[in-house]
Structure formats: structure tokens, C-alpha cells
Amino acid sequence: MSDAPAENLYRILPLEGGLTIYSATEHMQLLTQALASDVEVELDLGAVDELDCAGLQLLILAKQEAARMNCDLRLTNHSPAVIEAFELSGLGTFFGDPILIKPASE
């Protein structure tokens, strides 16, 4: 049998609700299951309505773990709560993903 490399996979993982200390363990399990070598993972943050320090730490850990595993992890569709947390913490550039600012509804 040959050890042929697995074909590249692309996964979209939508996160919903709060990414807080109360849900960090649950979200960490989801993220660690999604990350794998030579896999592209997109975290859709559009439905995240709350992000605290534990949630930020979880995203940092996921980004670092993905880099260690040669996994391409991208954060997309940033919700207003995520954008606000990134701005307050100064971590927007750390993640390196483009953040699209949506116009306010009138």
C-alpha cells in the first residue's frame, strides 16, 4: 500500500452565539476537531453575538495551532461583536484576515 497524500480539504465552520468563557470548552472541541494538516478551514464569525477575552484567547490558540499543523485557518464574515472585540484588543492585525465593514442599516 502506498502512503499517498490525502487530497486537500476545505471546511467551513460557522460559529454562533457567544464565544465566551461559558462556551470556550465546547468551541475548543469543535475547533480542534476541524483543524488538520493540509486542510483549509474557514471560521464564519457572522453569527457570533458576543466575544470576550476567553473567546479571543480561543481564536488566538486556534490560529497558532493551525499554523503549527500547516492548516490554513481563515476568519471570515466578522460580526459587529467580533469587529468591536478586535478593535478594543488591537488584535485585528494579528489574525491577518481581511475584515469587511458593513454599512449600518438606516
Image: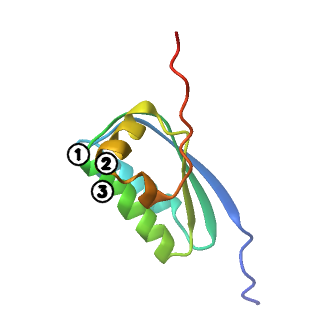
| Lower position in the chain sequence, tag 1 or tag 3 | 1
Q: CA distance from mark 1 to mark 2?
A: 7 Å
Q: Residue furthest bottom?
A: 1
Q: Is residue 55 left or right of residue 8?
A: left
Q: Position of residue 68 (x, y in %)?
A: 47, 76
Type of colouring: rainbow
Instruction: Mark 1: give few (<14), some (14-19) or many (20+) Cα within 10 Å.
Output: some
* Mark 2 surroundings: few (<14), some (14-19) or many (≥20) residues within 10 A: many
Q: Nearer the viewer, mark 1 or mark 3?
A: 3
Q: Residue 61 placed where, x, y %?
A: 36, 63
- The residue lying toward the viewer, choosing from 33 and 46, is 46
- Give the residue type that dot 3 points to: Gln
Residue 2, given in percent of the width and then of the height, sits at 76, 89
At a point 55% along the width and 69% down the height, the residue shown is 36
Label 1 close to label 2 by CB (< 8 Å): yes
Q: Nearer the viewer, residue 105 or 33?
A: 105
**Amino acid type of the residue tagged 2 in the rendering:** Gly
**Which mark is first along the chain, 2 or 1?**
1
Name the residue carrying label 3: 57
Residue type at mark 1: give it: Ile
Image mark for residue 21? 1
Question: Are circles 3 and 2 on residues that touch, CB within 8 Å?
Answer: yes
Task: Return the residue at label 2.
Answer: 55
- Residue 12, percent from left and from top: 60, 48
Q: 105 or 47, which is in the foreground?
A: 105
